[in-house]
Amino acid sequence: MRLLSIVPWVSRPPTRQVGPVSDDSPGFRSEVRAGQRGQEFQRMPTAARAKTNRDGTAGSTGRPRSEEAHQAILDATLALLVEVGFSALTVEGVAQRAGVGKATIYRRWASKLPLVVEAFGELPGFEEVDTGSLEVDLKETLNTYLNNFNSTSLGAVFPSLAGERAHNPELSKLLEPVTRGRREPFVRIFERARERGEISEEVDVDLAADLVVGPISVTLFFRGGTPSAKMVGPIVDLALSGILNRD
């Protein structure tokens, strides 16, 4: 709090008052205007000032602490992405949902674009699997991916952002490292398989990863379906064995 904002509250000479001063009186309004930041502290409810933690120690008062506010903003962003989508999401709406001021958001993010990207990055990923078998690694990783997709906000948020990034170059640029990070585990699975000699050295591991993940995107965006675990076996089998009958 800047000292200037509270000076009018402490430096004004005493004046005579006849009767109580109401919130609507000119004197009260002038003090509010003169000390806008001081007003918030002065009028804080007693219950808020007396807040304590469960262990009996003094707790924080007023707005959430910085870390709590940060997480509340990310949670609110994800919730609104699910409810209204990227286009209709506003910083004002996020601030209202998170219970913070817009200035609190703008101190951390320049606009809603980096805010949305960070919130998207908060969605659960999956631990990499290394069983020593390409087939097993792919099936277990795909199952985990689809479980996260269908049991968290990922299934609703990802389509919204994927559609928006097609005509929003700035969003696409910011999202690229995040989406690449979610694809990398599949690339590394093929890299390990190549090192073990399960696949040829000439195999393009990036393209191979796309062959595995691609059917999920096709189901979601082109067929209007919901990716499910029953797709995993056929996807992996087809990707590993190919289509042509080579007998």
Image (cartoon, rainbow, N blue to C red):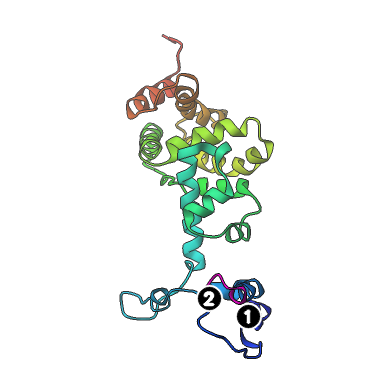
Residue at image x 66%, y 53%? Answer: 110
Tell me the distance, in whole angstroms, between the alpha carbons under discs 2 and 1: 10 Å
Task: Answer yes or no: is residue 209 visible.
Answer: yes
The kind of residue on which mark 1 rests is: Ile
Q: Residue 41 carries which label?
A: 2
Residue at image x 49%, y 65%? Answer: 67
| C-beta proximity under 8 Å, tags 2 and 1 | yes
Residue at image x 32%, y 80%? Answer: 56
Q: Looking at the picture, how far across and down is residue 59, in whole percent?
A: 40, 76
Q: Looking at the picture, how far across and down is residue 215, in whole percent?
A: 46, 24
Residue 110 to residue 54: above or below: above
Residue 12 to residue 29: above or below: below
Secondary structure beneath label 2: helix
Quarter of the figure with residue 142: top left
The kind of residue on which mark 2 rests is: Phe
- Is 42 in front, or is 50? 42
Q: Looking at the picture, how far across and down is residue 217, in whole percent?
A: 49, 27
- Is 185 in front, or is 50? 50
Residue 167 to residue 49: above or below: above
Residue at image x 38%, y 75%? Answer: 47
Query: Magenta includes 24?
Result: yes
Secondary structure beneath label 1: loop
Label 2 environment density (alpha carbons within 10 Å; few <14, some 14–19, many ≥20): few
Quarter of the figure with residue 29: bottom right
Q: Which mark is residue 6?
A: 1
Return the disc, 2 or 1, that comes first in the chain's sequence.
1
Residue 69 to residue 76: above or below: below
- Is 118 in front, or is 132? 118
Residues rendered magenta in the picture = 22-28
